[in-house]
Each structure stands twice: as C-alpha cells, then as structure tokens.
Image (spheres, rainbow, N blue to C red):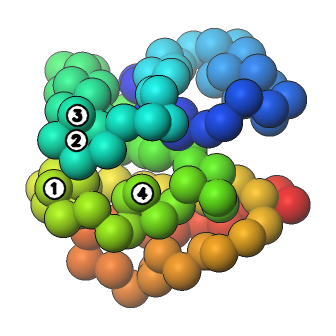
Amino acid sequence: QTVVCLLPNCPFFVCCWIGLVKVGMRAALVNTNLRGKSLAHVMEVAFQSNEHGGDDDDSNKNVVIVDASLVNILSNDDVVRKMMELHRVDVYVYGCGDTTFASTDAATSSVVIVGE
C-alpha cells in the first residue's frame, strides 16, 4: 500500500517515513510546493498503485498524512478535492493549527487529527 505524505521538513517527516517502511507500506513523499493539477496527479498515481494490491478492502484504502499547516492545500483546491472524492481518501492531519477540513466533507471518507 502507498500512503501519500504531505509533510514539511521536520522530525515527524522522518519518523513517519521510517514507520511506514517498517510496517511494509510505501510512502509517496510529496513536495509541499505542489498545487492544483500537479498535486492531484501525484496523489492519483500513488492511489492507482493501491488499486492493484490484494482483494482485501483494507489493503486498497487511500490515505493522506498531512501537516496541519498544509491542510488548506487539500481543502481549498477544487482539482485536488475532486480527485480525493473520486478515490475516497482517508486524511490524517498531524499537528495543531488551522484544521478546518470538515469531517463531514464529501471528498473524504474520514478525517483524523493526530499529534500536537
């Protein structure tokens, strides 16, 4: 499974990457400067690799780990929101800050806020 990591350069970035590798997942380390069609394309390529996983529903989940300071990139961009709606993405927000990404948003199946 591939997990999209949209995180700035910080200690959690390294811990997240190593943790995902340790449990057998691939981390798509996404440049935080990407926006719009470029960001949607990178995420879609990562999610397509999940579709070819196993028959188990849990192995085909699409997950994005995003820093709280970057959550507005996902919630304010129409192109990215449409792609996330198509792939039913689970969003994990790390840190504190403006977490206005509503859990009732149609673009995601769930939003979880973790860490501080």
Q: Earlier in the sequence, mark 1 or mark 2?
A: 2
Amino acid of disc 3: Ser
Q: Earlier in the sequence, mark 2 or mark 4?
A: 2
- Mark seen at residue 40: 2
Separation of disc 2 and disc 4 at Cα? 11 Å
Q: Are marks 1 and 3 in contact (CB under 8 Å)?
A: no
Amino acid of disc 4: Ile
Q: Please state which of residues 6 and 88 is positioned toward the viewer in this rendering.
A: 6
Amino acid of disc 1: Val
| Residue at the image position 73 percent from the left and 70 percent from the top | 97
| Circle 1 Cα neighbour tier, 10 Å, few/some/many (<14 / 14–19 / ≥20) | some
Residue 19, visible in the rendered structure: no
- Mark seen at residue 39: none
Residue 94 lies in what quarter of the image?
A: bottom right
Q: Secondary structure at mark 1?
A: helix
Separation of disc 1 and disc 2 at Cα? 7 Å
Q: Earlier in the sequence, mark 1 or mark 3?
A: 3
Residue that badge 4 annotates:
73
Q: Secondary structure at mark 3?
A: helix
Q: Are marks 3 and 2 in contact (CB under 8 Å)?
A: yes
Separation of disc 1 and disc 3 at Cα? 9 Å
- Mark seen at residue 79: 1
- Looking at the picture, does residue 10 appear above or below residue 103? above
Q: Are marks 4 and 3 in contact (CB under 8 Å)?
A: no
Residue 30, visible in the rendered structure: yes
Q: Give x and y (percent) for residue 101.
A: 48, 75
- Mark seen at residue 38: 3
- Looking at the picture, does residue 15 appear above or below residue 8? above
Q: Are marks 1 and 2 in contact (CB under 8 Å)?
A: yes
Residue 67 located left or right of residue 59: right
Amino acid of disc 2: Ala
